[in-house]
């Protein structure tokens, strides 16, 4: 299983001012509970507007799986509860209040698989897990074939997971042991450095520093491919340490190390904040004057947002480009085509997948909507963020990610039928 | 939003940069005749790209210049303008543009053109190359590999077979020169060469093996004719090589993980 650290991949450079080494603790005045990126989930609200909630208290649960809760990242008062038609969760906005307290969860059954599962679902950890194929959080009773812990993040401007779990070795080790109770398979820790653990089902796999070697999908594709019958979960190392603390104390630490970066900032910053943090407050004093775009996530796969997404650990602030004049019709005809553009093989494209899969046949299968070939080549282990680098390299502007999502959605529909 | 550089036209431009040494040496030794030949090929290819842009909304590509260069360098001599226009039109339209333009074609349009001209007008002689022009294929390949637009594995596969043949004394110098130039201009094209690593190695080896076989068995064939025939067969086999390489890759993964 051990893989030598390889130099495959790319190191795309995005301009950003250097970050100061100090890590500030920031709780934003407003925070939001949001579903995982791309998910539309039917929920049952457990609180109403104006209620005071403790940090870690459940604010909503899934309608069809009431054990899975969304919890408040900060203590405060519910300011707004926005639901989409069909009671799908849009966002629950909380105004911070210092006297809200911290929710404590019962941990007496955490030693057993069922008890641990209930604890994680009730404490709001479940949305931090992500399953493959198809993405999103796992079903209530799903048992994964393996769990991959990402102690490496090679996305441009991403904070190093080692700094996030520094000094929390015991929590991390406890969290890893807890994860072994959720699966009958292996728990794989992907990262340049990992703790010394003595467990026959915990494996440490070193990864290189170039993107996409620290991309969860590429790791899963290389180490334990996901299939329809063998789902694989992935989780960030910092969240594993949080699970370790939750199991021990009953309180879920909500802090996470976030890097604020991007060309539209005066200075970069590392902050310890919480999921759903208000990006405007985080970047207020360090953004350059002028219009800019706030993105939750990396410059490759992030999205414009007001709140830090549940699994994100990066905030990217980019200058808002002025929309130029429309090009001359002849220039437009020379540079645009009616259909998607063909993929031209090059070394850059191969490295955009870290050499993990045959890039050109895979992208041709994606472009042609050939789900059979794409599945053979590893589609089910991948999500949008894993092809984001190829999309960037080929200057596709999101086409590849959309093609991948369309193909995954079609396979999911067919599998469900 | 920020975007990367590796669009279709970037690759086409880098290919052109790789071909520059070859083109300059060829023009230097070929003089006005070579320039006129290149001009004619370029004009015909450009007209067809323009037609497909206007009629089919297919964006033209700078790869048209590479195609024109390959045709001008390797086409039979003394054909005259009419036959050249006919051959180029067939090759560019049927070999590339009807498939949707550069990037979607199966065979290199220059290979189709040259094969058409060779089969259609067998009475005309094939060109020979001065030594410096043939040597210029080496920097061309180096630039292509260094910029990542030409597959190194393909050159490696071809190189191993070629060296073995040279050591065995079955590959005369003119065939090596023509074979090298066709390898760079036609076979190493990133679109029509195999797309998998193993496919590239076997594709390069197959090309070199075909050149060796034709050189030994095809009596009366000109070196360029041998190289073009080998290039045509290699690009036709490329999808098969890719399929085989993918099947092997999938089988290895299945053995290692129990699933793909």
Image (cartoon, rainbow, N blue to C red):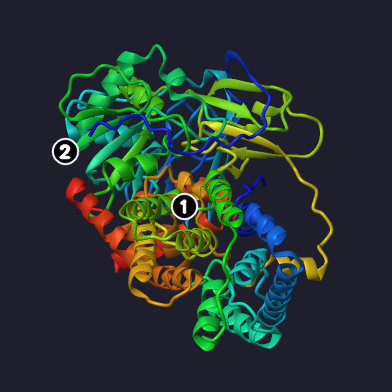
Viewer-closest of B150 and B116: B116
Which label sits on residue A184? 2
Name the residue rendered at 40%, 68% in the picture.
B234
Name the residue rendered at 63%, 35% in the picture.
A14
In which quarter of the view is residue B217 placed? Answer: bottom left
Please provide percent x and percent y for residue B173: 46, 58
B98 is higher (above) or lower (below) than B141: below
Q: Distance between the residues labelled 1 and 2?
A: 43 Å
> On the image, numbered disc 1 is attached to which residue?
B151
Badge 1 sits on which subunit? Answer: B
Q: How crowded is mark 2: few (under 14 residues within 10 Å), some or many (20 or more)?
A: some
Name the residue rendered at 37%, 30% in the picture.
A207
Viewer-closest of A254 and A323: A323
Q: In which quarter of the image is the N terminus of chain A?
A: top left
Name the residue rendered at 24%, 43% in the picture.
A144
Viewer-closest of A366 and A236: A366
């Amino acid at each position: 299983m051990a893989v030598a650290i390889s130099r495959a991949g790319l190191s795309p450079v995005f301009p950003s001012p250097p970050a100061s080494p100090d890590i500030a603790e920031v709780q934003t005045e407003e925070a939001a509970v949001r579903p995982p990126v791309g998910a539309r989930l039917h929920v049952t609200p457990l609180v109403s507007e104006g209620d005071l909630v403790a940090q870690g208290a459940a604010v909503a649960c899934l309608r069809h799986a009431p054990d899975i809760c969304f919890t408040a990242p900060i203590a405060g008062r519910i300011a707004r509860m926005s639901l989409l038609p069909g009671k799908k969760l849009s966002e629950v906005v909380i105004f911070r209040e210092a006297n809200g307290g911290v929710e404590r969860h019962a941990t007496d059954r955490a030693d057993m698989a069922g008890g641990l599962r209930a604890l994680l679902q009730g404490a709001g950890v479940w949305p931090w897990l992500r399953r493959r194929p198809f993405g999103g959080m796992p079903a209530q009773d799903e048992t994964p074939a393996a769990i991959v812990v990402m102690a490496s993040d090679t996305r441009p401007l991403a904070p190093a997971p080692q700094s996030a779990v520094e000094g929390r070795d015991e929590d991390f080790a406890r969290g890893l042991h807890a994860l072994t109770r959720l699966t009958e398979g292996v728990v794989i820790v992907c990262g340049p450095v990992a703790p010394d653990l003595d467990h026959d089902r915990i494996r440490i796999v070193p990864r290189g520093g170039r993107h996409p070697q620290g991309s969860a999908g590429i790791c899963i594709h290389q180490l334990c491919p996901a299939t329809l019958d063998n789902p694989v979960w992935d989780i960030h190392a910092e969240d594993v340490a949080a699970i370790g603390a939750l199991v021990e104390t009953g309180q879920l630490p909500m802090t996470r190390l976030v890097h604020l970066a991007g060309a539209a900032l005066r200075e970069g910053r590392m902050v310890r904040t919480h999921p759903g943090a208000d990006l405007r407050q985080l970047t207020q004093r360090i953004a350059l004057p002028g219009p800019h775009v706030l993105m939750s996530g990396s410059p490759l796969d992030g999205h414009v947002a007001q709140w830090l997404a549940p699994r994100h650990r990066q905030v990217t602030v980019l200058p808002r480009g002025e929309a130029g004049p429309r090009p001359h019709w002849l220039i437009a005809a020379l540079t645009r085509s009616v259909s998607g553009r063909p993929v031209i093989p090059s070394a850059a494209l191969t490295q955009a997948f870290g050499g993990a899969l045959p890039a050109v046949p895979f992208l041709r299968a994606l472009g042609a909507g050939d789900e059979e070939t794409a599945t053979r080549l590893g589609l089910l282990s991948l999500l949008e963020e894993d092809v984001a680098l190829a999309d960037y390299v080929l200057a596709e502007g999101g086409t590849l990610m959309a093609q991948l999502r369309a193909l995954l959605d079609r396979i999911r529909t067919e599998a469900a039928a | 939003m920020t975007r990367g550089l590796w669009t279709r036209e970037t690759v086409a431009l880098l290919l052109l940069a790789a071909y520059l040494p070859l083109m300059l040496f060829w023009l230097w030794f070929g003089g006005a005749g070579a320039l006129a030949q290149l001009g004619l090929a370029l004009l015909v290819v450009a007209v067809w790209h323009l037609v497909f842009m206007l009629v089919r909304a297919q964006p033209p590509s700078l790869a048209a210049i590479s195609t024109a260069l390959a045709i001008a360098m390797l086409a039979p001599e003394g054909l005259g303008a009419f036959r050249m226009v006919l051959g180029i039109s067939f090759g560019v339209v049927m070999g590339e543009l009807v498939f949707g333009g550069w990037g979607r074609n199966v065979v290199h349009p220059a290979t189709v053109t040259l094969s058409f001209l060779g089969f259609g007008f067998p009475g005309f002689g094939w060109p020979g190359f001065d030594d410096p022009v043939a040597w210029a294929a080496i920097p061309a390949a180096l630039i292509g590999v260094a910029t990542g637009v030409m597959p190194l594995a393909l050159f490696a596969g071809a190189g191993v077979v070629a060296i073995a043949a040279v050591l065995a004394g079955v590959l005369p110098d003119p065939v090596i020169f023509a074979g090298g130039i066709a390898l760079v201009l036609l076979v190493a094209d990133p679109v029509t060469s195999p797309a998998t690593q193993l496919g590239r190695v076997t594709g390069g080896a197959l090309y070199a093996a075909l050149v060796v076989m034709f050189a030994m068995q095809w009596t009366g064939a000109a070196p360029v004719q041998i190289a073009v025939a080998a290039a045509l067969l290699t690009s036709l086999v490329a999808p098969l090589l890719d399929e085989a390489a993918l099947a092997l890759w999938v089988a290895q993964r299945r053995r290692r993980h129990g699933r793909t």
